[in-house]
Amino acid sequence: MSKPRTITEPSRQIPIIAEADVVVCGGGPGGVPAAIAAARHGAKVVLIERYGFMGGLATAGLVAPILAHKAHAADFAIVEGLLREITERMHALGGAPCWEDTLKVWGINFDAECLKIVLDEMCQEAGVALMLHSYIADVAMQDGRIAAVLVENKSGRQAVAGKVFIDATGDADVAFRAGAPTTHGRAWDGRPESMGSFIHLAGFPYPDAARKKEIEALVEAEMAAGRLSFYNPHFLNRNDNQLDHTSANMTRFGGDPVNAADMTAAELSIRRDVWALVRFLRAHVPGFEHCYVQQLSTQVGPRESRQIVGPYALNGDDIHLGRKYPDAIARGSWWIDIHCPLGNTYPVHLCRKECPKGTDCPFYAAEYDRMRTYEELFPPEGDWYDIPYRCLLSIGVPNLLSSGRCISATHEGMAGSRVMGTCVAIGQAAGTAAALATQAGIEPAAVDVNALREALRRDGQLV
Ligand SMILES: Cc1cc2nc3c(=O)[nH]c(=O)nc-3n(C[C@H](O)[C@H](O)[C@H](O)COP(=O)(O)OP(=O)(O)OC[C@H]3O[C@@H](n4cnc5c(N)ncnc54)[C@H](O)[C@@H]3O)c2cc1C
């Protein structure tokens, strides 16, 4: 094989445009709460986000509802604090139900545009310095610690220096660039869960329950015949908050979210799948002649990619057994929800022992002994599992914390902890820990966990 051709990048002086106590990298469900919490605890905070708005997959991915705010199969909250405040502020703007009503249903439905403005306002009120439209491209290291992250934006390459860095990029971009150990997908072959985009469709009279069933059965028949490619046919699902369009979670792509070629292929493949559906509906379903794509996610959403390696990795047994830890800083209740890493493998939903593909799937054939039965995927009823503070620390870089879906967890652990209610709770803890560390002039690993837990409780969090 021929050696890849290379180009030498000229060495440059990069201006330090901001110096903060805490630099939050990524403005999704794991990042924004971290920035708000750190700023409210008195830290000077910069939040860097590649898009022109915050919310991560909750806005750019159109992902809804926010899950795991309450215990498994029960109606009491396990996450409050900033999640409750964000929900109540969206409720005040008509963008979410009131908190009490969210406890009666399985997730918190919300309007993504409303979430954007609420997050803008909360960050600004807390004094977070926002740096939008800025992509973190690299880090500058000094004595084994991160001295600055290097961002690319329309102004050029700029450095943001800080004392503690919180990696909330979802993909552990900062940890990876810093040379900290990271993992990727399943331990035995590196494959992550499949990714997906949400679809909003409009332009047709919304059918009653019986007609809905009939129309989705038509779509399912097309899927079974291989003419449409989705993992479920429920394109008529809606978000209670927005009844003028559907909100469907039915697309999938099996690939690597930290590989640009795979991400490109994913976007093209999902758009093709969605337009095949629209063409089918227009041609074959009365009333859908003018059906249109009202909105598709800004980006295909990764469920899992790179994660930092911490002193502890949340795992499947923690979830299934509802384990509690003395260094708990957040609670989760979502189950081991592994979307088939191979992508659109209809009728497969989850990677589990009852997989309908059976030995037709090479991974099933090789990994049967490591797989769980359906019952083994869930936490105990009326219970939750703890997220230990150790899952947020990096074993490689002392001034790095992680938040959201790139904390230290196994493939099974991440399948539960990745949902947004848990990410917000983790974010609040990461930001509070970072502020305590910078105030005391210590590394995050040296933060007194009891003091951290006490601060979180004072701020309304349930730990
Ligand atoms: C198809 C799908 C369905 C899902 N369904 C649900 C559901 O129903 N309910 C639920 O609660 N969860 C669901 N999830 C999971 C959930 O959306 C994510 O796990 C969660 O959003 C993770 O939050 P995060 O902040 O860690 O990462 P993200 O939401 O990915 O946010 C990361 C942020 O960092 C920014 N960023 C990334 N890299 C850089 C960089 N280099 N420089 C600057 N900025 C950067 C991104 O733009 C983004 O704003 C779903 C996920 C997918 C993909």
Image: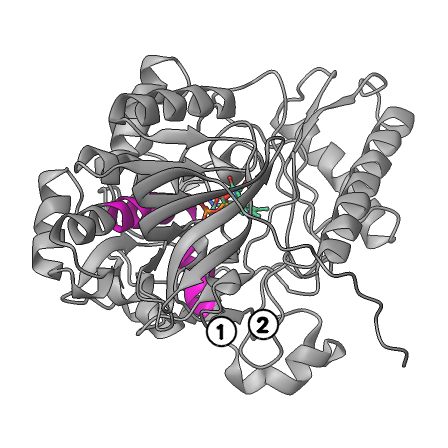
Which residue bears the numbered disc 1?
A: 373
Q: In terms of depth relative to the viewer, which is nearer, 258 or 301?
A: 258
- Relative vertical location of residue 281 with respect to residue 262 in this rendering, above or below: above
Q: In terms of depth relative to the viewer, which is nearer, 37 or 162?
A: 162
Which residue bears the numbered disc 2?
A: 354
**Mark 2 CB lies closer than 8 A to ligand 1:** no
Tell me where residue 216 appears, x and y as whole percent.
72, 37
- Res 340 seen here: yes
Quarter the N terminus occupies? bottom right
SS for callout 1: loop
Label 2 is placed on what type of residue?
A: Glu
The reply to whether callout 2 and callout 1 are in contact (CB within 8 Å) is yes
Q: Residues within 10 Å of mark 2 (few under 14, many from 20)?
A: some
Residue drawn where x is 61% and y is 28% of the image: 209
Q: Main secondary structure of the magenta part?
A: helix
280 falls in the magenta region: no
SS for callout 2: loop
- Relative vertical location of residue 212 with respect to residue 368 in this rendering, above or below: above
Residue drawn where x is 64% and y is 56% of the image: 257
Q: Which mark is residue 143?
A: none
Label 1 is placed on what type of residue?
A: Thr
Along the horizontal axis of the image, is 24 left or right of 196?
A: left
